[in-house]
Amino acid sequence: MLLTTPMSATPAAPMFWRRVFPGDPVQAKAVRVFAAQLLYGSPLLDDILLVLDELAVNAVRHTRSGDAGGTFTVEVRHEEGRVVVGVVDQGGASEPHARSLPCLDDLDRIEECGRGLLTVGALAAHWCWNGDGRGRTVQAVFAWPGS
């Protein structure tokens, strides 16, 4: 029997994944593999992987997540129209902030580190953080193309 009335499409339910990683900078590669498997085929994949790499390394370098026995958690949420990625750390003394861009006259003095959140801000639609010295979550939001 042929159906003459097409079934209406329903939006996909939001999807959410979370994984805990040891607080070691070499885990950034495992973070990228984790997210790449979840978002395979996304036109945003390269940007998302770079942002997650920056957030994971920041958690290890700048919070207690990088201490002996420390951990950080990566969260990936795909909702209608957007992907939200985040890294939850174990807190620390400083708050996340993006440094200002250097002047073109100062290009010889640009430090190798300290540009991670500038990169995040350049690639994501927006980024934010919440929490305190006991633990923080830094998130980046990407608009999903075609939604």
Image: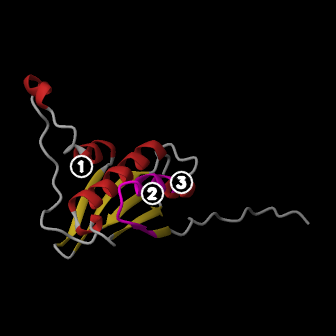
User: Given this view, does label 3 or label 1 mark the residue nearer the observer?
Assistant: 1
Say if 96 sits above or below 100 in the image.
below
Who comes first in sequence, dot 3 or dot 1?
Answer: 3
The relative height of residue 29 versus residue 65 in the rendered view (above or below) is: above
Q: How many marks?
A: 3
For the point 14% across and 26% down, which residue is it? 107
* First of labels 2, 3 by sequence position: 2
User: Which residue is labeled 1 in the image?
Assistant: 117
Instruction: Indicate the quadrant containing the N terminus: top left, top right, bottom left or bottom right.
Output: bottom right
Q: Nearer the viewer, residue 21 or 42?
A: 21
Task: Find residue 59 and report its horizontal and vertical position in percent.
Answer: 28, 61
Circle 3 SS class: loop
Residue under label 2, please give it.
Answer: 31
- The amino acid type found where label 2 is placed reads Val
Mark 1 neighbour class, 10 Å CA radius: few under 14, some 14 to 19, many 20 or more: many
Q: Answer yes or no: do the residues labelled 2 and 1 have beta carbons within 8 Å?
A: no
Q: Where is residue 7, by image quadrant?
A: bottom right
Give the extent of the magenta segment.
19-33
For label 3, the crowd category at 10 Å Cα-Cα, with few meaning under 14, some 14 to 19 and many 20 or more, is some
Quarter where residue 135 is shown: bottom left
Locate residue 71, reporting x and y percent.
35, 70
| Mark 2 or 1, nearer chain start | 2
- Give the residue pinned by disc 3: 39
| Vertical placement of residue 41 versus 8, above or below | above
Task: Measuring from the top left, give residue 24's x and y in whole percent.
Answer: 36, 60
Q: Which of label 2 and label 1 is nearer to you?
A: 2
Kind of residue sitting beneath label 3: Leu
Tell me what residue is drawn at x 22 percent, y 38 percent. Answer: 112
